[in-house]
Amino acid sequence: MHPLSITASSVVCALGAGRAALRAALHDRRGGLRPSGFPGAPEGIWLGCVPEVEAVTLPPALAGFTCRNNRLAEMALTTDGFLAAAEAARERYGADRVAVVLGTSTAGVEETEQAYRRRDPASGALPADFDFARTHDLQALPRYVRARLGLRGPALAVSTACTSGARTFLEAATLIEAGLADAVVAGGVDTLCRMTLHGFASLELLSRGPCRPCAADRDGISIGEAAGLVLLERAERAAPDTPLLLGVGASSDGHHMSSPHPEGLGAVAAMRDALASAGLQAEDIDYVNLHGTGTRANDAMEDRAVSHLFGDRVPCSSTKGWTGHTLGASGALEAVIAMICVEDGLIPGCLGVEQVDPTFRSDVAIANRAAPLRRVLSNSFGFGGSNCSLVIGRALS
Amino acid sequence: MKCWVGGLAVLGPGLPGWTGSEPILAGAQPWMPAEPAVPAPAMLPPTERRRTSLAVRLALAAAAEAAAGEDAAALDTVFASSNGDGAVVGAILEALSDPEGTISPTQFHNSVHNAAAGYWGIGAGSTRPSVSIGGHDDTFAAGLLQSAAAVVARRRGLLFCAYDAPLPPPLAAARHTTIPFATAMVLRPEPGPAARAALTLRYVAEPAEASPPGEGLDALAAENPAARALPLLRILARREAALLRLPLLGDAHLEVAVEPC
């Protein structure tokens, strides 16, 4: 693919709003996971919650979109100068030439959960004020962002479980390559809801403490919520040091709905596809930001896949010990983390890990390391056997 | 953006697969409303097959019909659905609002929007990239636009499937989908022996003129987001040239110029 410049990015997660909070927490090794205070959550788990989100109000004209997910999107839009950057792109290219491609696994289903609690006791009907189209519906997220930014280009909701956020980079690149857009607002927004918390609990995949990806004694996932937004444009005129999306790869496992292929064949295929689309070899990658959820199966599979391609020559780690697994936002959040890693020469070693799983063969970092990073590979894997890998680097000066 | 349509599929009330439906869609035979028989997917192992929901059955039946005679495992896929698996999502929401309710692991992994795509990968033995999208009432047009863009950008054949099933109460009252419907088509970057028509697509940032409500078969379009494909399916069945305008996002539309091969 032709590289795309990431001219703006914004992030909100358990570490706070904005890239500065995320950057500081990564350097200081301060995690954002806390014991759950989320109403109706399973007992005894830790979460990566964004408490401020509940106080966010949407602009009056768009108040009908109010739900936890669109509130989190609004937080990200008004953070890190994203709104101004998107408006500048709108002025530069025209509103109809800027597309919106956003990923989410559950959109505003948290609003539906609340509506179910307010059902009419006699008829079982949902309350009349419940707005399915502007909250629960997947399209509610890109519709909200498109309207909020005054855009008139194509808008797409991508929902491929935990690869949703990463996969939007591929669909955005497709729109630009096909000539349908000159700039794309891409990324992912996913919020805490009882559906995913109890769903992962039913699979017995939730950690009893803060998750410890790649640890010998890891015991599962901590769920988090996040919004990660990027503005992608053609990179031909990118200024030196502009963060770049150099490659995207995707694959399917074709194996099982919720268990990864044990040998990580799909993960290997996605990473290979990403390298090929960037025109790079394995030795061109300086750090791998793992999907690294903290489950026994995912991390073991991913270690096999990563060591198959990179041996123990490339340091890798998961940052989910800081943020939790933010599901359909994780790929976008971790793309922003990859940009910070490249900018700062930072390899953020897995948080809270005393001993790496002794069966692992890749070079798993558990303390922060400083190293010049030209290019970072970022992995996302999800239910349904969905895999997506991004290569993030920067324009050389 | 130009691409070529090959294999086609349709499944809905009175539309029992492409072969049986082609003369009906073309207007050569009358349309008779009838509950569609949606087969359990033969491509899945028996244990998985028995447990598949209506939404997954619809998607896989349409995808398999459109890809018949192709190397199905070699096609990238786009699965477009407004409601996803509403029966599963509805059951989970019921369980969450009941103090005694429990969610099963199978229910949870089937609730993801890409469940149908995941089953397609398992059944077809495909490791090719697959994306699942939503687009409310404009799901078909949004999926067609993204599919064509992928064909043009990546120069590969692609299987596009749009499907939706009615939601259970109380969600049904909040989201109008009264019939099951699915359609699928193989899109290619160049004409070939299997090509039926060339599609030239254009995104236009102006609203399409509202079309009058259809009658008979055409009235199905208002009953299911995937059935918004009917104007295109009818033109393809008639092997005619036409210019269609499919609404998108309230203030835009997808212009589709159809030229039969």
Image (spheres, coloured by chain):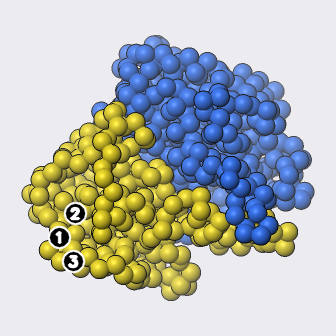
Chain colours: A blue, B yellow
The amino acid beneath tag 1 is Gly
**Between residues B190 and B21, which one lies in front from this camera angle?**
B21
Task: Determine whether A113 is above or below A395 in the image.
Answer: below
Residues marked 2 and 3 touching at CB (< 8 Å): no
The amino acid beneath tag 2 is Arg
Pointer 1 indicates a residue of which chain? B
Indicate which label's residue lies in the foreground, 1 or 2: 1
Pointer 3 indicates a residue of which chain? B
Indicate which label's residue lies in the foreground, 2 or 3: 3
The picture quadrant where one finds residue A182 is top left
**Distance between the Cα atoms at labels 2 and 3?**
13 Å
Residues marked 1 and 2 touching at CB (< 8 Å): yes
Q: Which residue is mark 3?
A: B30
Residue A272 x/y as whole percent = 44, 48
Would residue B117 be found to the left or right of residue A222 on screen? left
Pointer 2 indicates a residue of which chain? B
Is residue B3 shown to the viewer in this render?
yes
- Numbered circle sitting on residue B27: 1
Residue A176 x/y as whole percent = 36, 33
- Numbered circle sitting on residue B234: 2
Task: Determine whether A294 is above or below A287 in the image.
Answer: below
- Residue at 30% x, 69% y is B216
